Structures are given as C-alpha cells and as structure tokens.
Image (cartoon, rainbow, N blue to C red):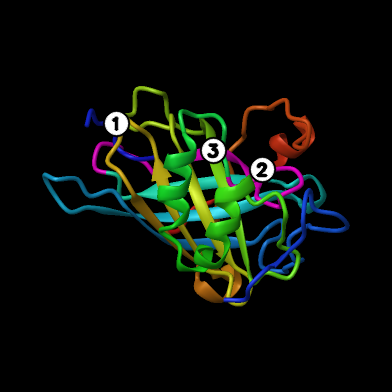
Amino acid sequence: MPVRVAESSTPSQVSGTNSGDTAPPACTLLSVGQTFSGTQNVSSLQKEEAWRVNVRIQGCDLEHGYLCGTMEALNVPMADTPVVTFWEGEIVDTKNYTFYTGKWEASPEDDKRHWTKFPSFSPLLSQVEVDGGKSLDLSNYPYIFMRWKEQYFVNVGTDCGLTIAGFYYVCFSCSDGSISGFYYDPNSSPFQKLELKSTNEGRSGFSFSTYELQPKQSAACSDELAAQCAVTAAL
C-alpha cells in the first residue's frame, strides 16, 4: 500500500505440462494465524522512507493455490491511525497459477523484471521464459512464490492518500519463514521492497486488535472466513 504518486535447490522439469502433485511444500510457517513483521520501503526520488508492516495469514488453501490475510502499515505519515488492508494471494504452483500474472497491468516483461529480483528465482528463469514455468515441479523447492493483491481498506477510507491499485510479487522461505516482496503499480515508485520475518505473538510482545472485515465473495475465501478475520496491531 504505497503512497499514491504519479510517477537454492534446483527444481525438476518435465516435458510438456506437469503431472502429479506439484503443490508447494507444506510449511507450518505458512498457515492460518501465522504473523509476520517487518518493513516496506516506500522511498522515492525525493526522500528515503520506510513503514513498519505487520501481516497475518487468515486463510490458506495450498490445493487451490490460494491464501488471504491482512496487512497493517504503521507510522504512515498522512494517516492518524495504522492503515489496514485485506489481501488475497495466488500461490505460484504451476497448476493453479504460473509466474506470468496476466492481469493487473503486468506484462510478461514486468513479471520477469520483478521475479528476477529474488536470487532464489534464478534457477527457474530459463524454464519460465519457455512456458511460464508450467513444466516445473516446485513441490520440493525451498521457496514459495506468490502474488498478493490488496482488495480493500479495512479501517480507513479510500481518500487516505494510499493506493492499493497494484500488487506484490512475494517470495517465502520455507526454512525460516522470512518473506521478501516487491510492489508493482505503474503509477507508484518502482520496486518498493517488503521485508518480513515470522513472529510469535506470545514471545514477541505483540498484542492484537480485531477489526470487522467486509464479507467478500471468493471461490476460496468464504464470507464466514472474511467475517472472522482479525488484524495484527503492533503496539
């Protein structure tokens, strides 16, 4: 949710379309209720700036390549309160979703420019250039690639000075639960970096406030799930 501005294992390959189970590896750090904390760099040519960010996973369905959650940005200069958004994510599993986005104003070249920002993507590039990675087997790969798209603001209006028009390219480490990401929006500063680490709310001193979210219609995220979502609020 940047400021609105105008400006390594090697995966196996199979020929043709992939077969068998290509779902990402199961990981306890990518599960419902897991929280992450870190920063998003929103620097522009005019100034250096970073916001504290908290994320909570609210739903995760590896079979369908889907997850959803809430993102909270703190110390946002133009906001009197932490800004909370609800997002839905696509897991790149080569079955439900590939590395090519195909929407949100992202071209294949935009996809490659962003995915190649992650060192862990390098072994995949040559095959992605051939078929979007459809023939890759990522089931044992130690990283999970995703796209996160914010759907709506939870606790502020759309006139808050921030935009959710873009989306995040995300890389999740299965070994330590760290997350790195880059925000893409043609009308925002490029390559705004998201850096998060998994947290344990009981051990890290975080407390959590609850916001009522709007029910959202989604094939994988039910109204009941959206209504029960809670957001991490670091004090």
Which callout, 2 or 1, points at the residue further toward the start of the chain? 1
Counting from the top left corner in percent of width and height, residue 19 is at 85, 54
Specify whether residue 145 is in view.
Answer: yes
Region in magenta: 77-99
Q: Residues within 10 Å of mark 2 (few under 14, many from 20)?
A: many
Which is nearer the N-term, disc 1 or disc 3? Answer: 1
Residue in the picture at 36% in, 50% down: 74
Look at the numbered disc 2 and give the secondary structure of its residue. Answer: loop
Q: Give whichever of 208, 138 is nearer the camera.
A: 138
| Residue occupying the far left of the picture | 46
Residue 229, numbered circle = 2
Q: Quadrant of residue 142?
A: bottom right
Q: Is residue 63 above or below residue 179?
A: above
Residue at image mark 3: 149
Amino acid, disc 3: Lys
Image point 50% across, 65% down: which residue?
122
Residue 26's label in the rendered image is: none
* Mark 1 and mark 3: Cα distance apart in space: 16 Å
How many neighbours does mark 3 have within 10 angstroms: few (below 14), some (14-19), or many (20 or more)? many
Horizontal side of residue 222 vs 195, given as left or right? right
- Element class at badge 3: strand
Rendered image: mark on residue 4: 1
Q: Amino acid at mark 1?
A: Arg
What is the distance, in whole Å, between disc 2 and disc 3 at their CAs? 16 Å
